Amino acid sequence: MDDDPTNRRLLSLMLKREGFRAVEASDGAQALALFETDRPDIVFMDIMMSGMDGFEATRRIKAMSGMDFIPVIILSALKDEESLMRCTEAGADDFLAKPFSLMVLKARILAMERVRDLQRAIAAKQLVLSELLEREREEQALAERVLSRVVMNRNVAMDRLGLVQRPASVFNGDLVLTQHLPDGGFRLLVGDFTGHGLAAAIGALPVADAFHAMTRKGVDDARVLAEINQKLYQILPPDRFLAACLITLSGNGSELRWWNGGMPSAWLRTSDGLHELHSHALPLGILSELPAQQAPKRIRLGQGDRLLLMSDGLLEASDEQGQMFVNTGFQALLNAWEFARPLLPALIAALDAHSAETEQSDDIAAVEIPMDCELLAPPKPALDSVHGRSGWSWSLELVDGRLGGQPSIMAALRPMGFLDQLESQAGALEIILAELYSNALEHGILKLDSSLKSTPDGFDAYYRQREQRLAGGCRGRVTLSLRYEPGEDGDCVRIQVTDTGDGFSEREVFELAPDPMRPWGRGIAMVRDLCDSVTYRGNGSRVEAIYRW
């Protein structure tokens, strides 16, 4: 672009002789308009023009180019250093002093074409990398959502533990699970999956299902470990596994049972000193069956004992010189740990001082537990003289616009005093009711297809459809009924859920076997694990679950 028609014509002829197509602009404003419509591969720019000069036109063209590299070559009789610097500051890529020969022009064009092609190749690779990073970020966010909403929200007594979790990126893949035992005891699992993000979160789902369901039923440590190991062996590839430490505090608080498969040593501080609970077994998911010699171990407890567990991310946290925390201040902290006093605050302060602003490559998790069965025990039901051990029944009907909310047993029954006998079992009952209600709403009323959840994208599509159908004004009715039946040999709650939808297919209701490889259909399998029986009638539109304890 040049305001001198002779110069423009001469340059156009030179370019056309070399096989190029050229468009001409007489000033900066026309140049911008032509650039917008024709988007040339190279721009030749004069500096001294009426109206908008070449400096301003160059700046605007570079802004319009965005991520696409389009070379701008300045053609000018100006040769002073200040003009050359202004060309560079405006974004010009090369400078050619007038007059110039055809050979020099051709050489500059070939050089700029090579630079342009290289820049575009780099930009294409950066775009692919950006897309991969964005996908990784989305997976990390989904993993965090899965872990926090599906896995961690079933934990108990978390406010009575000392817990620190620090992710290396968006999502912390270290797993912490807690649950009460029927005898008043307490069980905790701290795990560290190989890999991070969504892969670790998906592996956490079957682990959490087995841990919570079997612990609430009082299943012993060895069987819980065997079940988790089998599930992980079936679903994880050979290079993936779960290093884990399982801790069980007996109901009377006199004994600690522990199993360590590939995790850093846990440390028990008692009145007679430190006890190391070292790794003595393989991580979960490597072998099809756990060796018998790797059974859980036992240790006696006393009042005031405390236990510290951690993932290897804490021990391997590095400072600016690359030194790991385990090799600097960790052992000194353990040796200075006073009996019956918490260690975690001092541990985290020392870790912060060690790592400072250094970015860590692995997730960090640390848990400190007071070995106090009364502190960690589930809340005891307060049986008053009015309610005593009498049975009761309760029902709730949700219609049309009310169907979108999730009913809560605790919120509904506590004001009436009905939770007096059920407080210790409220968590399990909430899960059973939530799963049965979700099935009635999503499949009976909204007619959603669970097989959508077979892929990560399908999860999002499934819940988008759910929200859209609810927002569109669903029509139907779901009725919930609970009956509490106390007994000398144990108590029972019968939960019935009825919906006005079309129900399920025969195969979905009666033949859908538990499958750890399938990322959907887990809810009813978990309900079956928790309950004595789950019976469907009316082609799935009525279900009764019987829960005993």
Image (tube, rainbow, N blue to C red):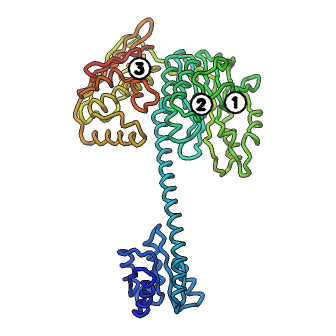
Q: Residue at x 58, y 16 (%)?
A: 251
Residue 386 position within the rendered picture, expressed as x and y whole percent measured from the top left? 38, 13
Q: Secondary structure at mark 1?
A: loop
- Give the class, few, some or many, for how many residues have Cα within 10 Å of label 2's Cα (few <14, many ≥20): many
Please name whichever residue, 322 or 46, is drawn nearer the observer in this view of the structure: 46
In three-dimensional space, the C-alpha distance between marks 2 and 1, rounded to whole angstroms, equals 12 Å
- Give the class, few, some or many, for how many residues have Cα within 10 Å of label 3's Cα (few <14, many ≥20): some
Task: Name the residue that disc number 3 marks.
Answer: 528
Counting residues from the start of the chain, the first of labels 3 and 1 encountered is 1
Res. 265 mark: 1
Residue 217 position within the rendered picture, expressed as x and y whole percent measured from the top left? 49, 17
Task: Tell me: residue 507, above or below residue 484.
Answer: below
Residue 187 sits in quarter? top right
Q: Secondary structure at mark 2?
A: strand
Please name whichever residue, 384 or 451, is drawn nearer the observer in this view of the structure: 451
Which kind of residue does numbered mark 3 sit on? Arg
